[in-house]
Image (cartoon, grey):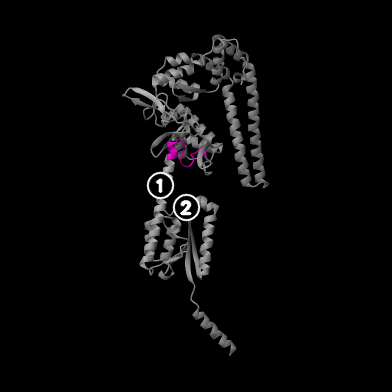
């Protein structure tokens, strides 16, 4: 009797308890960074699971998306829609944090509405279904439009910020091969990648020399152990894109507009143009647009903006601050040529000083060679040491003494040391017989610079100035130069000697600038 009564009681309780409904959880974050941080997804999942438990809903599936809801075609969203359509209409129930987590575009809203799913918006305290009142659906539609408008405004602001950054001369997006993004405060800038910047320089040098094709350079990357920014092999297409990207030479193209770059340069503009000529199968190195002789080499002393040029009356060229700041003035090209003439004239030394320098260089030739031999031996020692370390570590990996991940990390480090040592050895070998000749050519060029400058047209004057100067600032009728090494030392000596009437203070001919 007792047993039968108990069974009957349980049957009545079971029939009185409603069957638990099943539900689908949908969470979304906008970026891979948010996914890796994990906070947003974890918080959403915890909130939705608590809601399901409190409302006696059984969670059958969980769909996690890492994409913006502004665009249609999200992978996990589409999988969820297909899953819903396989279910009976009464079992189509979605739990989501709030409207903008589920969609920020009209098409996805219509898709969910056509599926006929019941949507629980936890943060908004709302439940939408086919039975919802028209006022509830209307308010939900307003929220979708607001989410869509917010997303579009956000995208517009991002684009505006990127355009502004490009106009200021800074690369606005992810760093290309050879650079890294570095954040300073709220701004991101490019800095040379310690390893891949070497590869970019090698690629340009080898391709310009005509010794390597693009296929050869891709193989070269593998041989030297270079990898792309995500750790993969550097393909032919990556090599080709690298050779065509002008950012390495001080310019970049963003949305079809070319800008002067303030990011650090990896190669010269001349080398870039030489590579373009080979890529296009021509010997021309002309720019695609009209250029002026002295643009790109001066900045405004007052605000730091570039000095740009313009033509007036179809024949007169004027140079001015690009931002037209309060302290700027406009200078005719003829006047600017005169100012730059004084800059070049400073390099000219009295004959006795030049003779002393030449004799000192010849006397120091043997010590220069000895120093080069010592540095070459040291570089070879570092290269051989790195090779031995790689071989020994490889043996340890085969014997199971170290893990493969540790071996790969250390090998990359040692191969980088090998590469640097190899480059130094090649440079020292090339320079061994050229040190004295190069120094003599520099002295000769410095002494002839003024005569060469005044006898050449503006475009050839610019080429000479590029050799001698690294940058100048301009204010009103004054140009302040920054000389390249070692011309800075020659300019200092020349000025000092001229002030002392050709010379009572002769320089030490064994100055380490030259003996080094």
Picture quarter with the C terminus: top right
Q: Is residue 256 visible?
A: yes
Left or right, 400 with reference to 70: right
Q: CA distance from mark 2 to mark 1?
A: 16 Å
- Residue underneath mark 2: 30
Depth check, mark 2 against mark 1: the one in front is: 1
- Please say if the residues under marks 2 and 1 sit with CB atoms less than 8 Å apart: no
User: Residue 296's spot in the image, x, y percent?
Assistant: 44, 28
Instruction: Tell me: residue 456, above or below residue 25.
Output: above
- Residue underneath mark 1: 156
Q: Nearer the viewer, residue 199 or 6?
A: 6
Crowd around label 2: few <14 · some 14–19 · many ≥20 (10 Å) = some
Picture quarter with the N terminus: bottom right
Q: Secondary structure at mark 2?
A: loop
Q: Quadrant of residue 195?
A: top right
Q: Nearer the viewer, residue 121 or 226?
A: 121
Crowd around label 1: few <14 · some 14–19 · many ≥20 (10 Å) = few
Would you say residue 417 sits in the magenta stretch? no
User: Residue 46's spot in the image, x, y percent?
Assistant: 54, 62
Q: What's the residue at 47%, 52% (across, down)?
A: 30
Q: What's the residue at 49%, 23% (across, down)?
A: 480
Magenta residues?
164-180
Q: Give the prevailing secondary structure in the magenta stretch.
A: loop
Q: Is residue 283 visible?
A: no
Instruction: Tell me: residue 458, above or below residue 20.
Output: above
Looking at the image, which residue sits at the far front? Answer: 326
User: Residue 114's spot in the image, x, y percent?
Assistant: 37, 64
Q: Secondary structure at mark 1?
A: helix
Instruction: Tell me: residue 169, above or below residue 505.
Output: below
Looking at the rendered structure, the number of numbered marks drawn on it comes to 2
């Amino acid at each position: 009797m007792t047993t039968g009564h108990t069974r009957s009681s349980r049957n009545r309780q079971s029939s009185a308890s409603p069957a638990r409904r099943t539900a689908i959880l949908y969470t979304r974050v906008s970026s891979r960074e948010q996914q890796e941080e994990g906070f947003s997804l974890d918080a959403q999942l915890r909130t939705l699971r608590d809601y399901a438990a409190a409302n006696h809903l059984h969670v059958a599936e969980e769909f996690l998306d890492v994409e913006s809801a502004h665009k249609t075609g999200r992978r996990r969203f589409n999988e969820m829609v297909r899953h819903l359509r396989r279910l009976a209409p009464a079992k189509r129930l979605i739990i989501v944090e709030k409207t903008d987590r589920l969609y920020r575009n009209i098409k996805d809203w219509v898709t969910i509405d056509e599926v006929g799913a019941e949507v629980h918006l936890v943060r908004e305290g709302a439940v939408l279904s086919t039975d919802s009142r028209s006022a509830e659906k209307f308010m939900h539609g307003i929220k979708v439009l607001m989410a869509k408008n917010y997303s579009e405004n956000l995208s517009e602001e991002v684009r505006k910020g990127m355009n502004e950054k490009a106009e200021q001369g800074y690369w606005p997006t992810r760093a290309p091969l050879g650079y890294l993004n570095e954040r300073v405060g709220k701004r991101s800038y490019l800095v040379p990648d310690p390893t891949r910047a070497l590869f970019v320089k090698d690629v340009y040098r080898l391709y310009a020399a005509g010794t390597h094709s693009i296929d050869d350079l891709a193989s070269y990357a593998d041989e030297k152990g270079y990898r792309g920014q995500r750790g993969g092999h550097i393909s032919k297409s990556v090599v080709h894109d690298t050779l065509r990207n002008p950012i390495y030479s001080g310019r970049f193209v963003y949305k079809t507009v070319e800008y002067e770059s303030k990011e650090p340069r990896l190669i010269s503009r001349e080398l870039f143009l030489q590579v373009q000529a080979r890529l296009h199968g021509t010997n021309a190195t002309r720019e695609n647009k009209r250029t002026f002789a002295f643009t790109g080499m001066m900045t405004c002393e007052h605000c730091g903006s570039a000095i740009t040029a313009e033509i007036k009356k179809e024949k007169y060229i004027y140079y001015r601050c690009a931002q037209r700041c309060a302290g700027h003035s406009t200078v005719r090209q003829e006047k600017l040529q005169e100012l730059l003439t004084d800059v070049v004239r400073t390099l000219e030394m009295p004959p006795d000083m030049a003779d002393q320098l030449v004799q000192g260089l010849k006397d120091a030739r043997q010590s220069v060679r000895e120093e080069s031999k010592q540095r070459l031996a040291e570089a070879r020692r570092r290269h051989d040491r790195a090779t031995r370390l790689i071989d020994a570590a490889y043996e340890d990996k085969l014997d199971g003494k170290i893990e493969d991940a540790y071996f790969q990390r250390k090998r990359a480090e040692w191969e980088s040391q090998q590469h640097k040592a190899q480059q130094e050895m090649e440079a020292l070998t090339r320079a061994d017989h050229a040190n004295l000749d190069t120094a003599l050519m520099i002295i000769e060029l410095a002494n002839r610079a003024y005569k060469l400058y005044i006898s050449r047209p503006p475009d050839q004057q610019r080429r000479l100035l590029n050799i001698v100067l690294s940058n100048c600032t301009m204010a009103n009728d004054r140009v302040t130069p920054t000389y390249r090494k070692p011309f800075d030392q020659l300019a200092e000596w020349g000025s000092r000697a001229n002030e002392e009437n050709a010379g009572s203070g002769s320089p030490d001919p064994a100055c380490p600038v030259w003996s080094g």
